[in-house]
Each structure stands twice: as C-alpha cells, then as structure tokens.
Image (spheres, coloured by chain):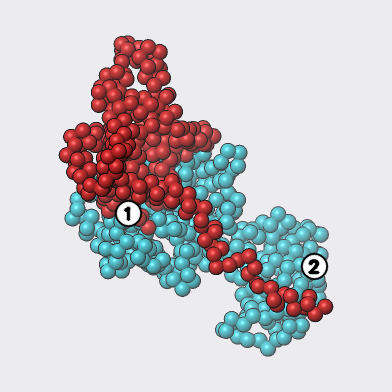
Chain colours: A red, B cyan
Amino acid sequence: MSDTATSPAQRRPNRGYGRWTPLWFLAPAVLTLFVIGIYPTIFALVTSFRRYNITRPREGFPFIGFENYVNVLTDSTFWSSLLLTAKFYVTVLPIQVALGLAIALLLHKPGMGLLKSLARVTLVVPLATTYAVVGLIGRLIFNRDFGVANQALSVFGFGPIDWLSTQDGAFAAIVIMDVWQWTPFCALIFLAGLSMVPGEIEEAARLETSSKLALLRHVQLPYLLPGLTAVMILRSADVLKLFDMVFVMTRGGPGSATDLISIYIQRVGFRIFDLGTASAQAILLLILTIIISRLYIRLLYREVH
Amino acid sequence: MTFLRLDNIKKSYGDAAVIKGVSFAAEKGEFVVFVGPSGCGKSTLLRMIAGLEDVSSGELYIDGREVTYEEPAKREVSMVFQSYALYPHMSVFENMAFGLRMAKKPEAEIKAQVLEAARILQLEALLERKPRALSGGQRQRVAIGRSIVRHPKLFLFDEPLSNLDAELRSQMRVEIAKLHRSLGATMVYVTHDQVEAMTLADRIVVLRAGLVEQIGSPTELYDTPANTFVAGFIGSPKMNFINAKVASIAGNTLTLAHPTFAGGTLALDTPAAARTKLGAPVTVGLRPEHLSVGAANPVLALTLDFAESLGGSTQLYARSEGEPIIALTAGRPNLKPGDALTLGIAPSHIYLFDAAGLAL
C-alpha cells in the first residue's frame, strides 16, 4: 500500500524526455543534410584549393592555393559556357513568364470550373517529370526522321529540320523542352498570386477602369511580384545546374552549341578527371547564384501588405 | 425626374433565384437605402447596379441611359466597399487619384480634385501614407474620398460602416449624411442596420428573400408598415406581436380575444373591422416605445419578468403566452420581477395584420 502511494511521487514527471531528446529528433534530418549537402560542399571547397586529378594519384593532391581559381577565371571555355548559360536563361525565362502569366490569367477567369481544375492538375505533370525523362522525350520529339516536331512542321509545308545535329536547332530544342517543363510552374505561381488579390479590390478597380491591361499593371502586378522574384531565383539557380535534360538530349553538342556551364563542369570533372578545377568552377557558380538571388530580392521583392 | 430605374430586375445562380423581380425608381439627389436581413439579396442588387454582377433579366437605367449590360467602368458609378478595398501598394493620394488617372485627366486637375476631396474628408495630413498605416475610420474616409473625386453620377455604398466600432460608426453616419447634403448626389446605400436606414435615408427599400416588401420614407415605414415583416424590421426594440382572434364585430367596433389583453379582450374602433370576419386570426402589433406603464385604462395585463435599466429609460420584459412582451418606458419605474404589470397604449398606435401578415 505504502509503495503504491509513494511511487507516483518518485516517478519523474517527464519520463522518456531528457536533455538529449530534441537532439534525437533533429539528428536524422541534420545527418542526412550533412551527408548529402554539407559534406560534399565542404569537400568541394577543400578540393578546389588542391591539385586533384584522380588519373594521376601518384602526384598526390597538394594544396596549391588559388591556382585552380586563377585557371578557371582565365579559361575562355568557362566564360563562353557561362555566357551560353546566360543566353539560355534570358531566352527561356521571358517565354516562360509570358506563357505562364497568360495561362494563369486564363485559369483565373471565372467559369468552366471542371475544365479549369482539370487544367490545373495537368500543369503539375511536366513539373513531376524527371529531367532525364524530359531529355528522352526531347530526343524523340526532335528526332530528324520520326519526331513529332518535324511531322508537325511538315503539315505547314516546312521541310524536315535536323534539330539535334545543327547548332541553332539543338539550342532551340533544349529551349523548347525547358519551356515545356517550366511554364506550368510559372503558371501555378502566378495563379496563386492572382488569387491573392482580394475580390473587392479587383472590383473597385473594375469600376474605375475598363482596361484589362491597367487592371493587370496597377492592381494585380503588385501581387505577382513576390512570385516573379521566386521564379527568377529558382530558375537562375536551376539553369546554372541544369544538366540531365541537356546531357541526355545533346551531350552539350553539336560542337559547343548546348555546352551549358554544368555540362562543361561535368566534362572537366569526370572526363578530364580534374576535380580540383571542377570544384573551383562549382564554388564560383555557387557564389554567383547567391549574388544573383540577393540582387533579385533587393531589386524586385516587395511585400504587398 | 427619375435618375435611377430598375425595371423587373431578376438574378438567379443556376436554378436558385436570388432576386425575384425588383422594380424601383429613384429621383436625382435622393438617398436610397436597401435594408433587409442577411441573404435578402440587397448586396446582389447593389452589385448589379454597379455592373459587378450580371443581370439575369430586366432593365437598368442610370440618368436616362440603359446600362443593363454596360461595363462597370462606363456606368459612371462609384462604390464604397465594406472592406474599403483600397489598393494596398498605393499611397492615399494615389488611391484617390487612380480613377482620374485611368480617365487620363491632366495632372493639375487630378491634384486639384484629390486635394479638394482630402480637404472635405480631413485627409490632408495622410496623403503620403499607405493604407496599412491608417485606422479603420481613416481607411473608410479614403474609400469615400476615392469615390467622390471622380464626380460619379451615382454613389453606391455596400455596408460601409459594419467594420467600424459603434462610436466611429455613428460619427461616420453623420459624415455620410453631411456629404450627401453638400454634394447633392444620388446615393444608394445597403445595410442590415435599421438605425442606419432610418437616419440616412430619404427613402427605404425593404427587401426580403429577393423581393421588395415595402418602399417608403423612414416615417412612412414606421407609421404604416405594409406587413408584419416590415413592422418587425423597422423600429428598435422590435414590435410586439400578439396573435389574437376576432371575438365580435359590431359596426366599426372590433373585439379581439387573447389572454394577454386586460380582461381577455381588446375592443377597438377601426375601419378595419369591415375587412375581417368573426373568428379570423388577427395579429396585433404594439411598439415597445408606445406602451405606457400604469395607464388609466390598461390594454395589457401581464407579469414583469425582467427589467433592464438603460439609465434614462428602462426596458421591461413581461411574460405572456407566446412571445414575451417588451415595453420601453422613460425613467425608472419601481417594479420588481413577479410584479403585476399593466400597460396602456393609444388606440392610434395599435397595428392590425391579417392571417397573411398584411396590414388591415
């Protein structure tokens, strides 16, 4: 009798919850992040300061200071790849933003509820498709002899284009596939922005102007800017590391027509096996991504409320 | 001269009819209030006048021009919304200037108009602020300012005061009334608050379930309600209703029977006697403020249930068969719950309604 009376008092109120409990909950996530994110980044940072060619292990991997960085910054191929990547970015982004906005505006219009929810669901399909698969689809679409692209062109009387073996054709092909994959993302982001505009504010504007363009420019656009910033940041980061789709479709060719920066880095790292230089390139890319993101946020991002 | 005319306006969403045929005309400069309980269609009706809601059938005229299918911006109306609906990213000045800019007015004129509106509404000190830095009352004034700078033909208000606290609400009510007087503009105002309707309106349109119950000046609605709905809706506290039966008719003298009446019956000299028959149900309406305590020949004999002192007056709740009877009396009568309560009323203040609820 007496021990049943004392045992609740002796029992610790938070049994099973100790000093280290929060740590155990955090550990799996932190560990995973460390293994797949932080460790490789640190490894790349360290490697970028070494001569690290894995085909010549006998020479060892000595620290050489900033020599890799100097090599990268004086490498004209690096700069032309970067320029090509920038050209790719400024080509695809306006198309994606314009088409995405158009789709979002159409979906935002009242009426046709069932069809619109169907359309919203189908928007997710390209987003859910793996880059490599997009590349494979691209290879099929732009095949010279049996591709859908040439078949569609022949309907309008245009001769077959050898998409993937010409410089401009290959670039156009990867642009089209990227637009296919990312326009729905822009549309969804803009649609979310449009639905944030309070109904009464839109109505107040409709009483003051009948111009749809003025409504878009003065009332809806402020609500779209945060989404546009997000799109620009995500897309610039994504284009800088865009690899699988282009690699599967063109391997960077023909010549250097689609030799985007990530393809070039892959070649330096895993064809030439100069991991030191490749790491330096990757770190420079990371810094560039951060700078661009900060710029976008500084220049564009505005809270509406 | 008729300025705003609604001709058998109907609205339905699919099979659900929301507005079931409303016809109505307002004169230039009139202040019209749409009033009714939630869901009666008053806001839908206002939004149809603005063009924000399509008209299912019927015709709508503003200033002699048919605008039934006209775009909202081309109707030359302005609207003040319940949520104020200010453009959050624009300053107070830009909010008010937006409509003029869209109309491509010269910059000097825009500035003059906005400053004039700001002066009227005492917003001069706030012109550079963003809406989020304003209080509810200030936002509401900006919303009103935005609607007056354009000099619209018609002002529409959609429950503009319901987001404000009680004190601010009565203050803004006075400001809107003053504004109406100084601008001389035609205004249509939607509210569920019968006090706002009574104090602001030149004419009130009482709506219920998509139909007009009665149209008239505030005093007309108060003095001669067309039916029990209007009688119960206009006036605060609500009118008391007693469901009596006709006990006898002798010429113009009508005798009604109900246990609540002193002596079980109520005899009245009324021309309505001819319009009813023996044994017919008659609803007797008595306004709380017309009932007087301790009158010489009482009409009602009741027991006091509860008394609420409002300071200057007292609200009495009396037990009866059916709904409790409420009386509003000046001063503080010396009564306790359970005391006998006799209430008198002038015969001219007794309202009679037939079985369908229509005034007899």
Residue B234, given in percent of the width and then of the height, sits at 58, 64
Q: CA distance from mark 2 to mark 1?
A: 72 Å
Q: Give the class, few, some or many, for how many residues have Cα within 10 Å of label 2's Cα (few <14, many ≥20).
A: many
Looking at the image, residue B326 sits to the left or right of residue B48; the answer is right
Residue B66, given in percent of the width and then of the height, sits at 40, 40
**Residue at horizontal 50 percent and vertical 35 percent from the top:** A121
Establish if B85 lies above or below A169.
Answer: below
- The answer to whether the residue labelled 2 contacts the one labelled 1, judged by CB atoms less than 8 Å apart, is no
Residue A58 tag number: none
Residue that label 1 marks: A302
Quarter of the rendering occupied by the C terminus of chain A: bottom left
Please state the total of marks drawn on the protein image.
Answer: 2
Q: What is the secondary structure assignment of the residue under circle 2?
A: strand
Residue A95, given in percent of the width and then of the height, sits at 31, 33
Establish if A201 lies above or below A186.
Answer: below
Residue B276, given in percent of the width and then of the height, sits at 75, 58
Towards the viewer: A213 or A207: A213
Q: What is the secondary structure assignment of the residue under circle 1?
A: loop
Q: Give the class, few, some or many, for how many residues have Cα within 10 Å of label 1's Cα (few <14, many ≥20).
A: some
Quarter of the rendering occupied by the N terminus of chain A: bottom right
Looking at the image, residue B169 sits to the left or right of residue A163; the answer is right
**Residue at horizontal 62 percent and vertical 82 percent from the top:** B309
Given the current orientation, which residue lies at the most extreme bottom position?
B334
The quadrant where residue B179 appears: bottom left
**Three-letter residue code for mark 2:** Ala
**Three-letter residue code for mark 1:** Arg
Please determine if labels 2 and 1 lie on a single subunit: no
Residue B257 tag number: 2
Q: Nearer the viewer, mark 2 or mark 1?
A: 1
The quadrant where residue B291 appears: bottom right
**Residue at horizontal 73 percent and vertical 83 percent from the top:** B337
Towards the viewer: B90 or A43: A43
